[in-house]
Image: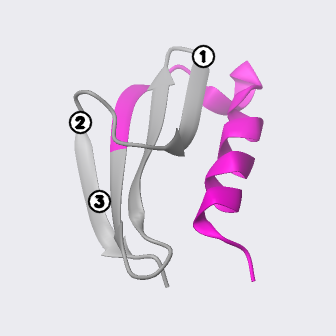
Amino acid sequence: MTTVNEIFDEVNRRLADPAKAGTTTATYQFDLSGDDGGSYHIVLNDGTGDAGAGAPDIPNTTISMSAE
């Protein structure tokens, strides 16, 4: 079974390509509950992107859901 960390690691790997990150500027926070839960982020900034564990400083959007 794929873990939450593995999913965000894959998203981060894909965001290394500026074409995938696009020209969007947005910061997303994911608050995940459950055994594999915690705070995660995706930050897009005009062609660059970062995803991983931890809450961003100032999210534009916060999504709360189960990690299951």
Magenta span of residues: 1-28
Q: How many marks?
A: 3
Amino acid type at mark 2: Asn
Q: Is residue 19 left or right of residue 8?
A: right
- Percent x, y of residue 50: 57, 30
Marks 2 and 1, how far apart in space? 17 Å
Residue at numbered disc 1: 47
In 3D space, how far apart are the residues under numbered discs 2 and 3 (Cα atoms)? Answer: 10 Å
Q: Secondary structure at mark 3?
A: strand
Q: Is residue 19 left or right of residue 25?
A: right
Q: Quadrant of the N terminus?
A: bottom right
Query: Which amino acid, mark 3?
Result: Ile
Who is closer to the viewer here, 15 or 5?
A: 5
**How busy is the neighbourhood of tag 3: few (under 14 within 10 Å), some, or many (20 plus)?**
few
23 versus 21 height, above or below: above
Earlier residue among tags 1 and 3:
1
Q: Residue at x 33, y 33 (%)?
A: 56
Q: Position of residue 11 (x, y in %)?
A: 67, 46
Extreme-top residue of the structure: 46
Residue, disc 2: 60
Secondary structure at badge 1 equals loop
Which residue is drawn at the image coordinates 60% and 18% (left, top)? Answer: 48
Q: Give 42 or 54, whichever is nearer the viewer.
A: 54
- Whole-percent x and y of residue 57? 26, 27
Please state which of the two labelled residues, at mark 1 or mark 3, is closer to the viewer. Answer: 3
Residue indicated by mark 3: 63
Residue drawn at (73%, 25%) of the image: 19
Other-residue count near label 2 (Cα within 10 Å), few / some / many at <14 / 14–19 / ≥20: few
58 left or right of 68 in image: left
